[in-house]
Image (cartoon, helix red, strand yellow):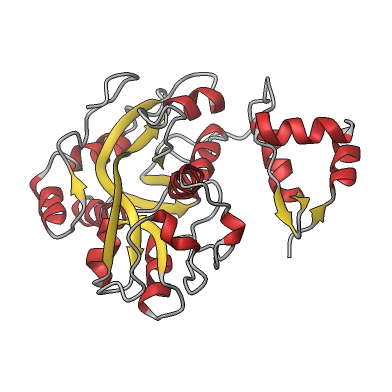
Amino acid sequence: MKKLLSTKEIAQYLSINEKMVYTLIAEKGLPATKITGKWVFPIHLVEQWIETNTDNYPEPAAQLPPYHGLLIITGSNDPLLDKTISLFNNLYPEHVAVFGNMGSMGGLRALRQNLCHMASSHLLADNEKEYNFDFAKKEFDKMPAIVNFCRREQGILIQKENPKGIKSVADLAGESITISNRPLGTGTRLLFDRELEKAGLEGDKINGYRSEFSRHLDAGLEILSGRSDAAPGIRAIAGILDLDFIPLRWERFDLLIPKDRFFDKGVQLFLGVLHEEPFRILFKENFGYDLKSSGKVVYPGNDN
């Protein structure tokens, strides 16, 4: 188990008084959770929070080598993206595309650290009208190009025929209901936590809230196996696993690309696949997607 610090310990760690700790929780998003009524602080998340909020973050010394056939994509996982990577590898055998599942925030950080060519992300802004731009502004000195991969439907995965009678996020607080959750730093967890807040629910009062699964499919498999009753996730997983689904919203799922990498051959070939008929065939085989903006560059305030 990762180390937890008390309020006094975190105040000492940050060299501030305890009153300021509560201010940082409320106003600056200091990672914290309550156990038996007392605040505790996961030190690994606090360290990530400090890094994310650091001004003048030093540029990494390491740089990706010139493109030589290996295309590295990191970030948020998606079944259609997985199939598109396989399609790319079949269409262009002289190239190899690989994916690192790190969640949306992990993908942005990897991109900032020059560890990949593209990052997949679906981070919803505080105004709930835009995706990815606000987070990219915080992470990068130079705004990357943002290309839409797809739109997809987010919601709550539930057991087939809904035996627990779950109709909304508010019902997840029922004593007989257990969920499987997504990790912090993923766009799905960000959306889910906001929906819980709207419903007036505390995550730690929901059974299974701390049971985190790195992929949509893994969270869905927990429901299919009967180990959980519900999970935040995308409609595509409900289709794959024959689960029921409660819709919440359509979201934009994008690819972020540094502008100095945008015209790398592998990047251009991959973006070209999004306009090809084989990609459209993949779309027809999967539920819960909209490709009307796929492959198009998106701009703030122009939610294509």
Question: In percent of the image, x 41 and y 45: which residue is there?
Answer: 73
Quarter of the image where one finds residue 29: top right
- Expressed as whole percent of the image width and height from the top left, the position of residue 271 reads 24, 37
- Expressed as whole percent of the image width and height from the top left, the position of residue 124 reads 42, 35
Q: How many marks?
A: 0
- On screen, residue 113 versus residue 116, left or right, reads right
| In the foreground, 149 or 7 | 7
Which image quadrant: the C terminus?
A: top left
- Answer above or below: position of 57 versus 244: above
- Expressed as whole percent of the image width and height from the top left, the position of residue 185 reads 54, 46
Question: In percent of the image, x 61 and y 35: which residue is there?
Answer: 62
- On screen, residue 116 versus residue 148, left or right, reads right
| In the foreground, 94 or 55 | 55
Question: In percent of the image, x 54 and y 32: which residue is there?
Answer: 112
Question: In percent of the image, x 39 and y 40: which residue is there?
Answer: 122
Which image quadrant: the N terminus?
A: bottom right
- Expressed as whole percent of the image width and height from the top left, the position of residue 115 reads 53, 41
- Answer above or below: position of 45 versus 118: below
| In the foreground, 81 or 228 | 228
